[in-house]
Amino acid sequence: MVARQHRRQVVDLGRRAGGGRFRIPGPGYGFMHLLNSGKTGSGKSSTATKLIGSLAGRADIVLTGDDHKAGMELLPWSSRFTETATTLAHTEDLLGRLVDQVDARGQTILEHGHEQGRTIRTWESWMGPRLVHVVDEGAELTYSKTAVELLDSLAARGRALGVHLIVSTQYALTADFPTTLLLNLTGRICHRMGTAAQYATALAVDQGELRDHGFEPIPEGERYQGVCYVNGIPGMADLSRCRTDLVSDAAIDRRAAATAHLRWSPEHVFDTRRSAGAAVELEAETAGDRQGSRRPEATTESPTPAQPAASVLFGGLTS
Ligand SMILES: Nc1ncnc2c1ncn2[C@@H]1O[C@H](COP(=O)(O)OP(=O)(O)O)[C@@H](O)[C@H]1O
Ligand SMILES: [Mg+2]
């Protein structure tokens, strides 16, 4: 039980140089928006895969994604992901709906955050699922000003409202991304880069700090794929050097199949009528009743087969 609870609270990604595990706090436990950077072939997608594999096991997490390489990277997860955009037009639409969710959630807290005898300022999982949006290659989005603005809005407002971003990109260029967006992607995982300046930007430090921490560039070559530095991650010393565990394709397929029953259907995530219904439900809910189902509409309205049972979602988390 303790181990299960621990698995829920932390995302285990790999090893830390010098011993210990490379772990980050999970959504609801201090998770921060992540910028996952590095040159092509440095291990970004593998790190994202390890993250997704861990989050996929949580019934209270909705996964969505952006994958413009014909969906190649996120394709293995399609049975667990609610929606994956593979074109810019789709990305704009999906990000727009995620921003709508942020607005609706902010409204819910505004209207109902003073009930139940305490003041609620941030999203809590009994109010609804956490949304994690995974971008496989952030630079692809920069062709659309709309997409970048929507991502910026999510990064600025989403975290307190249970909407989180994992953005992978080759470089963390201010020419590509607005400064505010980069500032709000506070958790940094940086794989092999070309220059010290690129490492510094990707890790949100200056080059002097890199030197002070005894930073050494990550060499090219198989032995160093998946090696990364981290910064801004609670529980991890700044500029810790780590290596993500490599997950085999077969293991990804097994994990996707084993967690497919936890996939949230788009109607339950994006239907604002249902979101409004959830707010009314929240009103009726008492503090002692939080373990109960939050979404009775799942049983009274047209059933969605892919939807996990409400008891699995917010009752005893058995998986
Ligand atoms: N943590 C790791 N341990 C060992 N090998 C790795 C690791 N991460 C990646 N690799 C190897 O590097 C290759 C490229 O990794 P990938 O994640 O696709 O890089 P990127 O997304 O940055 O282009 C993978 O196919 C794999 O063989
Ligand atoms: Mg990749």
Image (spheres, grey):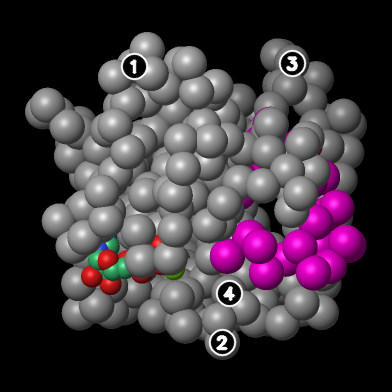
Q: CA distance from mark 4 to mark 1?
A: 35 Å
Say which label, 1 or 2, has the lower sequence index. Answer: 2
Can residue 24 be seen in the rendering of this structure? yes
Magenta span: chief secondary structure? helix
Q: Which residue is mark 3?
A: 119
Q: Which mark is residue 70?
A: 2
Say which label, 4 or 3, has the lower sequence index. Answer: 4
Query: Which residue: 56% across, 29% down?
Result: 204
Q: Which residue is mark 4?
A: 67
Element assignment for label 2: loop
Classify 10 Å Cα crowding around label 1: few (below 14), some (14-19), many (20 and above).
Answer: few
Q: Tell me, yes or no, whether the two marked residues, 4 and 3, touch with CB atoms within 8 Å.
A: no
Q: Is residue 127 left or right of residue 113?
A: left
Q: Is 64 within the magenta?
A: no
Q: CA distance from mark 1 to mark 3?
A: 41 Å
Residue type, mark 2 in image: Ala
Q: Tell me, yes or no, whether the two marked residues, 4 and 2, touch with CB atoms within 8 Å.
A: yes
Where are the magenta residues, as a range? 137-165
Where is residue 206, by image quadrant? top right
Q: Is residue 31 left or right of residue 180?
A: left
